[in-house]
Image (cartoon, rainbow, N blue to C red):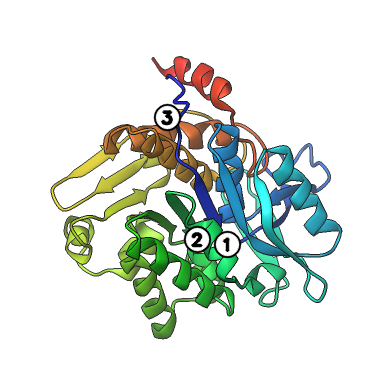
Amino acid sequence: MQQNKNIPKVSVLGDANVDMILNLSNKNQLGDPQLFSGGSTANVASGLSRLNVPVSFFGSLGNDMYGKFVINDMQSDGIDTSNVQLLDDYSTAMVIGVVEENSDRHFFIWPPENGAHNQFEINDDMIENLLDSEWLHVSGIGLRFQPLQETMLEVMKNFRENNKTVSFDLNLRTELWGLKKEFKEVVLKAISYSSYIFGNLNEELLVLFEGGLSSLHNHFEDDQKIICRNGKQGAIGIDKSKQIFSQAFPVAPIDSVGAGDAFNTGFIFSALVGETFESSLDKGNLHAAYKLLGHGARHLPNYEQLTKFSTQFK
């Protein structure tokens, strides 16, 4: 892999929080809970910045010890945090994750509804700063509550109207909140503004759309691409003309928290530097494999580490 020095700037908008992880993968040697920075979009921002992509993060955190912990991590990774709001009246959300012996994970969020990340609102200056980049990445977890829902849809629409790229990770978390008709309509509106739509094949895409895998392409426009993450089976890329199957890399997972975000990071990075749809799927799987071999959602490589890691599979 060769590093491209002229990588377009990326804006990432959405959730940032802390992850408190209890790892039960080895019940004979239980350790203390571990604290990491997290958040679906924040994880992608961190991963891209480590790959030398210029990244600006837009979102809100509580003006508390956890919010400052997250800000410090972002800045250490080289992310522009000048558009992050620290709020006095709301708490930084904590995601409590339990990792089982088979690497499956279960999440619990506190506070469940009024976390600081849901309170982000933008002004005209922020819109201008956002549109200074060529790519926007967002996550469906930001659509659950106001005012972040309205903010996210407005920004996505602006990018679409300015012919810029939008990547949207569905991240529906139906196991926590279900999928009511009203929310499904909001998700479909967000999809209409998106260039790339990421989602778990069975838990999200086939829940949103009837007809099975073979007819998924019928629900999207000609210029949209669908990326179906499928766990140990790898990923499937779909557009109007084809389906591409990309196999997962064979690793023994230690911790699967953030694996989907890591996949998104690898895919976006590959697409940013002009690689093909098929190659971007492969890079997504490679990046996810690297993450699976370490604890926490931020076990993510820099460019040199990713290059060295890729040589194991040649």
Any mark on residue 105, and which?
A: none
Q: What is the x, y in percent for residue 126?
A: 58, 63
Which residue does the image show at 47% across and 54% down from the upper left? Answer: 137
Residue 203 falls in image quadrant:
bottom left
Which residue does the image show at 68% across and 67% down from the upper left? Answer: 109
CA distance for labels 3 and 2: 25 Å
Q: What residue is pinned by disc 2?
A: 139
Badge 3 amino acid: Phe
Q: Nearer the viewer, residue 249 or 238?
A: 238
Q: What is the x, y in percent for residue 136?
A: 46, 54
CA distance for labels 2 and 1: 7 Å
Q: What is the x, y in percent for residue 117?
A: 66, 67
Q: Residues within 10 Å of mark 1 (few under 14, many from 20)?
A: many
Q: Earlier in the sequence, mark 2 or mark 1?
A: 1
Q: What residue is pinned by disc 3?
A: 249
Q: Check the picture and name the quadrant holding the C terminus.
A: top left
**Is residue 147 something that shows in the picture?**
yes
**Is residue 35 something that shows in the picture?**
no
Secondary structure beneath dot 3 equals loop
Which residue does the image show at 85% across and 63% down from the upper left? Answer: 64
Badge 2 vs badge 1, beta-carbon distance below 8 Å: yes
Q: Residues within 10 Å of mark 3 (few under 14, many from 20)?
A: some
Q: Check the picture and name the quadrant holding the N terminus.
A: top left
Badge 2 amino acid: Ser
Any mark on residue 14, and which?
A: 1
Residue 212 falls in image quadrant:
bottom left
Position above or below: 138 against 142: above
- The residue positioned farthest toward the right in the image shown: 65
Q: What is the x, y in percent for residue 299?
A: 64, 36
Badge 1 amino acid: Gly
